[in-house]
Amino acid sequence: MAFLASLAAIVIAVFLPSRLVPQFARSHYLEHFAAFYVAGLCGLAASPRARLRTVWGRLFLFTSGLELLHLLGGASWRTLLDNWVADVGGLAAAFAPLAVARFRRRFEPPSA
């Protein structure tokens, strides 16, 4: 439920006028990063049996689609690219610890 709530909050924040969206940080990009960090963590918690690539791919498509929707509103490519990089950075920060842990397990000696 928290995962769907986080995605819904992101979608609502994207389509509301900026003056109606509360600011949680001084940086617009930090807010993008934090939103997708939380969405990534919630996505991982909501899909414990899914492969990391699957959860990552779905959230990657979600953020890419949302940023591309801004083109319909006439946003500039540079702004969209900057927002998208912050979004993907938040996802990467959420997924990195699990990816590294799984990578390291491949090199552990077999159990006796």
Image (cartoon, helix red, strand yellow):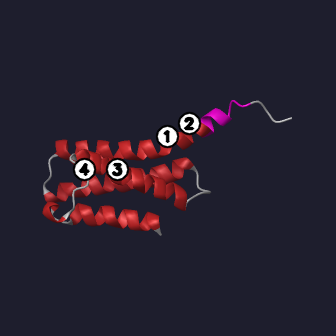
Pointer 3 with pointer 2, Cβ within 8 A? no
Q: Which of marks 3 and 4 is nearer the N terminus?
A: 4
Q: State the SS at label 3.
A: helix
Query: Could you tell me how far apart the alpha carbons at marks 4 and 2 are, in whole angstroms?
Result: 29 Å
Q: What residue type is labelled 1?
A: Ala
C-beta proximity under 8 Å, tags 3 and 4: yes
Query: Which residue is the site of mark 3?
Result: 34
Q: How far apart are marks 3 and 2 (CA)?
A: 21 Å
- Residue 58: x and y in percent read 45, 55
Distance of label 4 from label 1 (alpha carbons): 23 Å
User: Which of the two discs, 4 and 2, labels the residue nearer the N terminus?
Assistant: 4
**Residue 89 in the image: above or below residue 70:** above
Q: Distance between the residues labelled 1 and 2?
A: 6 Å
Name the front one of labels 3 and 4: 4
- Specify start and end residues of the magenta stretch as a single range: 102-108
Q: Residue 57: horizontal and vertical position, in percent?
A: 46, 50
x and y, in percent, of residue 17 in the image = 15, 64
Lower sequence index among marks 3 and 2: 3
The three-letter code of the residue at mark 3 reads Ala
Task: State the CA–CA distance, disc 1 to disc 3.
Answer: 15 Å
Identify residue for label 2.
100
Mark 1 or mark 3, which has the lower sequence index?
Answer: 3
Helix, strand or loop at label 1? It is: helix
Q: How many labels does the image show?
A: 4
Q: Identify the amino acid type marked 2.
A: Val
Residue beneath disc 1 = 96
- Graded by Cα atoms within 10 Å as few (under 14), some (14 to 19) or many (20 or more), the crowding at tag 3 reads many
